[in-house]
Image: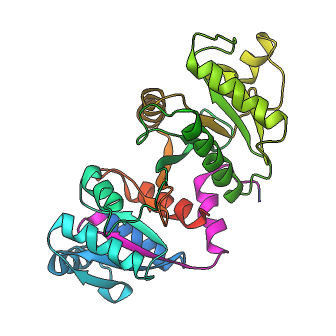
Amino acid sequence: MNITKLDQVIELVKSKPKKRLVAAYANDEHTIDAVHRAVEMGIVDATLVGDTDTIKSVCEKLNISVDDFKIVQEAVDTKAAAKACDLINAGEGDILMKGLLPTDKYMRAILNKERGLCPANATLLHMAVIENPQYHKLLCVSDCAIIPAPDFKQKQKILSALISTAKSLEIARPKVAILAATEQMSVGMQACVDAALLAKMAERGQIAGAAIDGPLSLDLAIDKEAAQIKKMGGEVAGDADCLLFPNIESGNVFYKCCTKFNHSEVAAFVMGAKVPCVLSSRGDTTKTKLYSIAVAALAK
């Protein structure tokens, strides 16, 4: 299957074994509606941790049967997040999902040393899959929300996660652009140095399974005409499947420009924990949350 749209990801995940999802503080309409759609599609079985009366009220409003879920009572958001992590640790879930609680509380539950989902020495990172109407295929991008200024080792882990995510979308040999402000090799710009090192490691077979190039400016990574004009050859230029950002500011601004200016569809989750952790905004649409569940269900 040649996947270029997030709707196709849903069709792909339907063909895979069903996963078990645990939603933390699932008291809102968009979370419950998205999870219910995923249940109806056969993507997941679901447990909703939250206030039972609120969940039942929302289900009644949406004409959803509460029998489609397992409901675990917990009316306090932080306690609901901790209890959701407990269920994952007890082997009762394959995916964690954020409901109606702030991201900082959600992440604190995941990072909690006693009850969380973060293995020793793990690197948590934010993964997004973007369907931008101005681009000819899906883009896997990282890190846009968690690691402020990734060092070289962290960039290696981000690179590995990008390749893994792209392969889960059935991209056999992902094309990864290591971004910087310029494609020129500038030793005074750490992003250029790191990108060149990663590209050289790939060239020598130290990083397998992908075509990797860098440093590349954003225009050269995604615009074939710009690459031709600037005489930038190679497999990646103008046709990237994945973008590795040099810092959180560049990644976050790119992500929000896509969603706000181009009305892109997105899916987002956290990698590096014991299980994929769906990370969408409380204000995100049902569709965004459903796409995020689908992409997380494919993650390895």
Image quadrant holding the C terminus, namely bottom right
> In the rendered structure, which segment of residues is drawn in magenta?
2-29
Q: Nearer the viewer, residue 20 or 196?
A: 196
45 inside magenta stretch: no
Task: Please say if 177 is above or below 172.
Answer: above
> Does any portion of residue 146 appear in the rendered image?
yes
Image quadrant holding the N terminus, namely bottom right
Percent across and percent down for residue 176 are: 70, 37
Determine the residue positioned at 79% across, 42% down.
206
Colour pattern: rainbow
Determine the residue positioned at 44% across, 37% down.
259
Task: Please say if 195 is above or below 56.
Answer: above
Question: Residue 179: which quarter of the image?
Answer: top right
Determine the residue positioned at 21% across, 80% down.
56
Q: Nearer the viewer, residue 121 or 211?
A: 121
Task: Please say if 87 is above or below 112.
Answer: below
Percent across and percent down for residue 263 are: 46, 38
Percent across and percent down for residue 71 are: 28, 83
Kindly give the residue lying farthest to the front in the view shown. Answer: 120
> Does any portion of residue 236 appear in the rendered image?
no
17 inside magenta stretch: yes
Percent across and percent down for residue 286 are: 38, 59
Q: Is residue 246 left or right of residue 242?
A: left
Question: Residue 256: which quarter of the image?
Answer: top left
Q: Is residue 49 left or right of residue 117?
A: left
Q: Nearer the viewer, residue 220 or 60?
A: 220
